[in-house]
Image (spheres, rainbow, N blue to C red):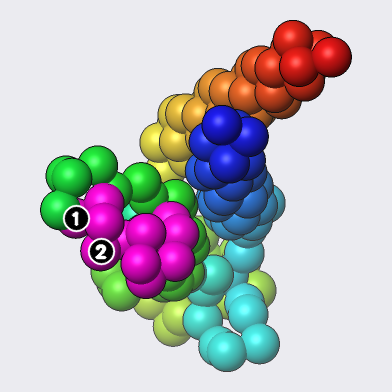
Amino acid sequence: MMSSFFKSMEISSSALAAQRVRMNILSSNLANVQTTRTPEGGPYKRQDVVLSAIPLGSEFEDMLADKLDSKLKKVQVVSIHQDTKEARKVFDPTHADADKDGYVKMPNIQVMSEMVNMITATRAYEANATAFNESKAMAQKALEIGR
């Protein structure tokens, strides 16, 4: 019984960690929307988090769950993907990084899209925090019943 509560907390905590990484990457994208010069050379490249569902539990539990069609999964950050699109060119001959034609290569970041993604990540984080707290409250109630 308590094992179920711990599993639900582990699933929620994995999602909390994944959304935290996602919010950090989105914050970095927003902070670098005007960055035209990076240590790697050229403008900042937008990043995105790649998430995946991975099995929760031991090999035996996974084999049993396969047979019962009830495999639990948790979230894991698989990688941080860097945008491969060409940087957008903005005409600004007064900019220090302008080329000979007066164009500056700017990061391929759409502020509105990044803000929508940030709101989505924040709401997912809040939902998982709520689920975690509810699992904890149920476990505490179960312990009180056992007294």
Q: Secondary structure at mark 1?
A: helix
Q: Is residue 109 visible?
A: no
- Mark pair 2, 1: CA separation: 5 Å
Q: Which residue position is annotated with label 2?
A: 63
Q: Amino acid at mark 2?
A: Met
Q: Which residue position is annotated with label 1?
A: 66
Stretch of the chain drawn in magenta: 54-66
Quarter of the rendering occupied by the C terminus: top right
Q: Position of residue 20 (x, y in %)?
A: 64, 47
Q: Amino acid at mark 1?
A: Asp
Name above or below for residue 116 compared with residue 22. Answer: above
Q: Position of residue 121 (x, y in %)?
A: 52, 35
Tally the marks. Answer: 2
- Please give the name of the residue rendered at 44% of the width and 50% of the height, measured from the top-left corner: 74
Name above or below for residue 74 compared with residue 83. Answer: above
**Residue 94, image quadrant:** bottom right
- Please give the name of the residue rendered at 58% of the width and 41% of the height, measured from the top-left corner: 3
Quarter of the rendering occupied by the N terminus: top right
Name the residue at the front extreme: 147
Whether residue 32 sits left or right of residue 77 in the image: it is right
